Image (spheres, rainbow, N blue to C red):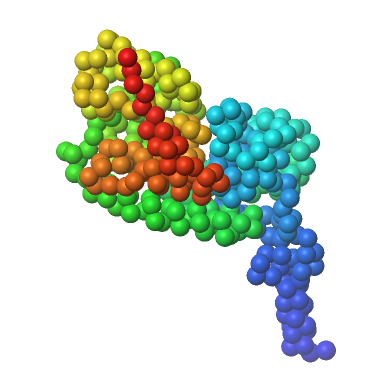
């Protein structure tokens, strides 16, 4: 046999091997029950062709829920009755609270087809995903969690879950409602930007400064976070500040997060207490409870819940620039992302939770 014939046979064998490994859908023709999925970290992960049981980490929760309300084997949050009101029972009922930082034995016991892990895609995170995959012998699929990349994330997740049609609805909502506003608020002159104090904790004396993931929307919506001298804390954040310091800043607006509790205790404290009454924001009635149902509209968790918060906050700060019907866009958001049909009256109450203080 000549050298040329040997080379020809070798090349034919290579082509045959590559064709039996995968096709353009990522499904292995030598084993149609397996497909190769390239995750957002660029890793080729071997996963079942049909996914039936999916472990979700906390950052994946709302992105996953917008596309699928059934196939998760766990929940990453302990949902209150208020939150459950807006969620499908199939998503949380009879599903254990197991988080990715918890027991590996609990994760394995759930027998998921994959672990869906949404993180900031750093080399360290990629290494951890590889180690976890090898240790548990369960495929780990990495997704981004950056709010700026939600369109790409949702397209990729739609591909993973076989929910391309629903993922296109999510992407279309972002393109039609979020993208145009980003251009508008980016053009607001610095002298016209609103100065904001983000009041957190049970009495409003905690905050997150610029650079924190928890206050990111203030920056994105063209606001000025006045807590420039406060240290950014990792994890849950919420740096303590004094009332004297808040008076020195004297914000134009106060946005209040009351712990996602229906009591709105911090809002009532700020609006009704003589201790806060001489601040410009209080005197001009620019104190606003951040909507929290079913999840915080600015933060907590720092997920896709922030998209409706982006629309709410930018419209609150710059109505003459943004000029949207927050009631109608809230109804559309809840239908698209939460699969919840909301009346106009309910949307009005949820998007404007400002009780009278007597």
Residue drawn at x 71%, y 32% as measured from the top left: 96
Question: Residue 157: horizontal and vertical position, in percent?
Answer: 58, 53
The quadrant where residue 256 appears: top left
Residue drawn at x 34%, y 46% as measured from the top left: 325
Question: Is residue 123 at least partly visible in the picture?
Answer: no
77 and 267: which is toward the camera: 267
Question: Is residue 331 at least partly visible in the picture?
Answer: yes
Q: Quadrant of the C terminus?
A: top left
Question: Residue 82: horizontal and vertical position, in percent?
Answer: 55, 29
Residue drawn at x 59%, y 44% as measured from the top left: 65
Q: Is residue 253 left or right of residue 261?
A: left
175 and 128: which is toward the camera: 175
246 and 21: which is toward the camera: 246
When the figure is inspected, residue 327 is found, relative to residue 229, above or below; the finding is below
Question: Residue 130: horizontal and vertical position, in percent?
Answer: 66, 45
200 and 265: which is toward the camera: 265
Residue drawn at x 38%, y 52% as measured from the top left: 177
Q: Is residue 258 left or right of residue 121?
A: left
When the figure is inspected, residue 177 is found, relative to residue 10, above or below; the finding is above
Question: Residue 237: horizontal and vertical position, in percent?
Answer: 45, 25
Q: Quadrant of the N terminus?
A: bottom right
Residue furthest left as drawn: 191
Q: Is residue 201 left or right of residue 11?
A: left
Residue furthest top as drawn: 274
């Amino acid at each position: 046999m000549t050298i040329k014939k040997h080379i020809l046979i070798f090349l034919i064998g290579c082509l045959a091997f590559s064709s039996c490994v995968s096709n353009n859908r990522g499904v292995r023709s030598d084993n149609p029950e397996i497909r190769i999925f390239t995750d957002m970290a660029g890793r080729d992960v071997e996963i079942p062709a049909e996914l039936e049981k999916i472990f979700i980490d906390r950052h994946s929760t709302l992105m996953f829920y917008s596309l699928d309300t059934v196939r998760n084997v766990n929940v990453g949050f302990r949902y209150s009755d208020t939150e459950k009101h807006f969620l499908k029972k199939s998503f949380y009922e009879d599903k254990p609270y197991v988080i990715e930082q918890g027991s590996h034995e609990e994760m394995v016991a759930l027998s998921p087809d994959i672990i869906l892990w949404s993180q900031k895609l750093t080399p360290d995170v990629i290494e951890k995903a590889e180690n976890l995959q090898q240790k548990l012998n369960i495929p780990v699929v990495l997704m981004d969690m950056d709010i700026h990349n939600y369109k790409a994330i949702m397209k990729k997740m739609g591909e993973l879950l076989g929910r391309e049609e629903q993922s296109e609805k999510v992407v279309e909502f972002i393109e039609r409602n979020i993208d145009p506003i980003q251009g508008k608020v980016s053009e607001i002159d610095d002298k016209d930007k609103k100065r904001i104090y983000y009041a957190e904790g049970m009495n409003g004396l905690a905050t997150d400064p610029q650079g924190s993931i928890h206050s990111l929307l203030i920056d994105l919506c063209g606001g000025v976070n006045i807590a420039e001298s406060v240290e950014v804390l990792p994890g849950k954040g919420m740096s303590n500040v004094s009332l004297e310091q808040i008076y020195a800043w004297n914000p134009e607006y106060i946005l209040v997060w009351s712990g996602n509790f229906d009591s709105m205790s911090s809002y009532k404290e700020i609006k009704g207490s003589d201790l806060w009454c001489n601040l410009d924001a209080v005197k001009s009635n620019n104190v606003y409870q951040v909507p929290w149902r079913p999840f915080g509209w600015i933060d907590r968790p720092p997920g896709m819940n922030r998209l409706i918060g982006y629309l709410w906050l930018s419209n609150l700060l710059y109505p003459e620039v943004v000029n949207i019907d927050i009631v109608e866009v809230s109804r559309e958001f809840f239908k698209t992302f939460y699969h919840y049909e909301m009346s106009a009256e309910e949307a009005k109450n949820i998007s404007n939770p400002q009780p009278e203080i007597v």
